[in-house]
Image: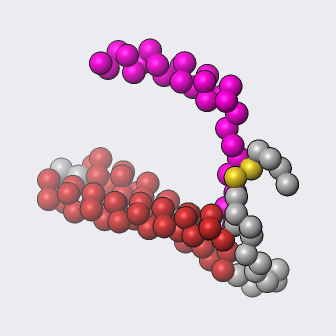
Amino acid sequence: MNNNMVNNPETEVPKTPEMNDSDYLNDFLATEKSLSSNYVMVMNEASNNSLFDEIGNICQETKDMARNLFNLQFKKGWYKLEKAQDSKINTVIQEYEPKSNELE
């Protein structure tokens, strides 16, 4: 096993041409991500405050659902993450630290 990966043991699913639970969750997550992006674009164009607020609520629900789907995929071992190397993390910190200080 790659020591640079963060994941759970994978729940087995049938390897057939038909969609399985992992495929469905992946499809649902991709859909929620797309909807979320589209809601943000709609919010940017909303000239009515009530509409803006309502779309914002729907957008948050969509983001919450995407997070829940991600968590379920990760729990089932169907979503794997790669650990960031310390050097990459430090590089990003150094890049954004001056910008952060400007905001203070």
Residue at the image position 68 percent from the left and 25 percent from the top: 87
- Judged by its main secondary structure, the magenta piece is helix
Magenta-highlighted residues: 78-104
Residue at figure coordinates x 69%, y 43% from the top left: 83
Q: Is residue 27 among the parts visible in the rendering?
A: no
The N terminus sits in image quarter? bottom right
* Residue 82 visible in the current orientation: yes
Give the percent coordinates (x, y) of residue 90: 60, 24
Residue 30, image quadrant:
bottom right
Magenta stretch: residue 49 in it? no
Quadrant where the C terminus is found in the figure: top left
Residue 83 higher or lower than 19, as above or below: above
Residue 64 spot, x, y in % from top left: 41, 63
Which residue is outermost to the right? 1
Looking at the image, residue 25 sits to the left or right of residue 12; the answer is left
Tell whether 8 sits left or right of 45.
right
